[in-house]
């Protein structure tokens, strides 16, 4: 069987992971742990898809700085760096991740010098030999519009290539405008969102309304598993119990495993099961790309 072939478009970043031992004390100190780990939602998807045996091409940007050099070397070691562009004078994205003792987190995205994808970064030749295109909301929010990907997505649909989208952040969905976001992205084959993101896309509406936008709408529910809505009904899969350490990147790992398994077998229950397992594995460890 030919391995699935994914084109992954979006953000690449370093996660500055901060785990205080207790409540933060403003104006003073608290002990804890600080780690610098490879991340970025799209990079996480590409790296995990490649590790799962898929062919994965990552399209994204790093800055012309030391962190960019380190990230590019890392992505090259993972085999996904062929279309990662170094932006002259740019600054590689950093994300501050504060992790509470209960493993819940909050993100601070450095948006002082955002690296913005353009249509020139996503030429249609990237679709040659591809089974699915994955785009995330962070790429849209950073660019200020999904227009950079419009021609590529239209060509993918014309070729019958599966189009998948993860909206990334319920707070940024609300700030951007859910209807605007969905209209710009267009009709999807697969929508991958956690419960908060799904509700942010359809404020005050039933989640079944997502099927007006996607053939399959996957709702990730962390420790409660996940559900896939489609025209014939719903398919659910429970998550295995784990000890949660850090949920950063667990949803991205879920996306990678779901897409790889679904492309290989076109079985929603099987894909949900694989996605829950890898998402749980990542949540039980520190960092988004830790093996």
Image (cartoon, helix red, strand yellow):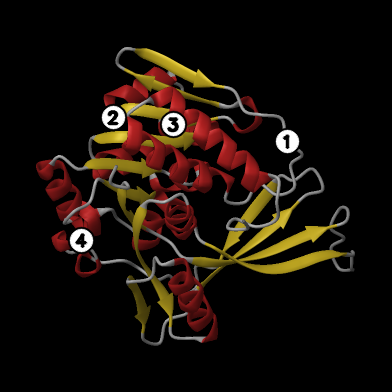
Label 4 close to label 3 by CB (< 8 Å): no
- Marker disc for residue 55: none
SS for callout 2: loop
Residue 28 against residue 197 in the figure, above or below = below
SS for callout 3: helix
Which residue occupies 70% across, 51% down? 285
Please identify, in this view, whether the residue under mark 4 or under mark 3 is nearer the observer. Answer: 3
Which badge, 2 or 4, comes first in the chain's sequence? 4
Q: Quadrant of residue 267?
A: top left
Please identify, in this view, whether the residue under mark 2 or under mark 3 is nearer the observer. Answer: 3
Q: Seen in the image, is 181 located left or right of residue 78?
A: left
As measured in the structure, the alpha-carbon distance from the residue carrying label 4 to the one carrying label 1 is: 38 Å
Which badge, 2 or 3, comes first in the chain's sequence? 2
- Residue 42: x and y in percent read 43, 56
According to the image, label 2 marks what residue? 213
According to the image, label 1 marks what residue? 242
As measured in the structure, the alpha-carbon distance from the residue carrying label 4 to the one carrying label 3 is: 25 Å
Which residue occupies 49% across, 56% down? 44
Please identify, in this view, whether the residue under mark 1 or under mark 2 is nearer the observer. Answer: 1
- Marker disc for residue 271: 3
Label 3 close to label 1 by CB (< 8 Å): no
- Residue 136: x and y in percent read 39, 50
As measured in the structure, the alpha-carbon distance from the residue carrying label 2 to the one carrying label 3 is: 20 Å
Which badge, 4 or 1, comes first in the chain's sequence? 4
Q: Quadrant of residue 203?
A: top left
Which badge, 3 or 1, comes first in the chain's sequence? 1
SS for callout 4: helix
According to the image, label 4 marks what residue? 126
Q: Which quadrant: the N terminus?
A: top left
> Total label count?
4
- Residue 33: x and y in percent read 81, 65
As measured in the structure, the alpha-carbon distance from the residue carrying label 2 to the one carrying label 4 is: 25 Å
């Amino acid at each position: 069987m030919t391995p699935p072939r994914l084109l992954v478009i979006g953000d690449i970043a370093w996660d500055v992971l901060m785990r205080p031992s207790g409540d933060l004390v403003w104006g003073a100190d608290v002990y804890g742990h600080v780690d610098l780990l490879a991340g970025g939602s799209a990079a996480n998807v590409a790296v995990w898809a490649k590790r799962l045996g898929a062919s994965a091409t990552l399209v994204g940007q790093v800055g012309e700085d030391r962190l960019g050099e380190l990230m590019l070397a890392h992505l090259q070691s993972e085999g996904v760096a062929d279309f990662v562009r170094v932006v002259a004078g740019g600054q590689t994205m950093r994300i501050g991740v504060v992790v509470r003792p209960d493993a819940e987190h909050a993100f601070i995205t450095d948006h002082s010098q955002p690296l913005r994808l353009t249509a020139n970064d996503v030429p249609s030749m990237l679709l040659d030999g591809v089974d699915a295109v994955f785009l995330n909301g962070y790429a849209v929010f950073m660019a200020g519009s999904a227009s950079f990907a419009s021609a590529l997505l239209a060509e993918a649909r014309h070729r019958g290539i599966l189009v998948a989208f993860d909206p990334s952040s319920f707070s940024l969905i609300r700030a951007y405008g859910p209807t605007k976001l969905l209209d710009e992205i267009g009709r999807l084959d697969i929508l991958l969102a956690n419960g908060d993101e799904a509700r942010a896309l359809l404020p005050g509406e039933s989640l079944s309304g997502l099927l007006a936008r996607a053939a399959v709408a996957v709702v990730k529910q962390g420790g409660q598993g996940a559900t896939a809505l489609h025209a014939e009904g719903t398919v659910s899969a429970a998550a295995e119990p784990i000890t949660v350490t850090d949920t950063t990147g667990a949803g991205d790992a879920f996306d990678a495993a779901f897409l790889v398994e679904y492309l290989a077998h076109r079985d929603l229950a099987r894909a949900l099961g694989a996605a829950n397992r890898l998402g749980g594995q990542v949540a039980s460890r520190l960092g988004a790309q830790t093996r």
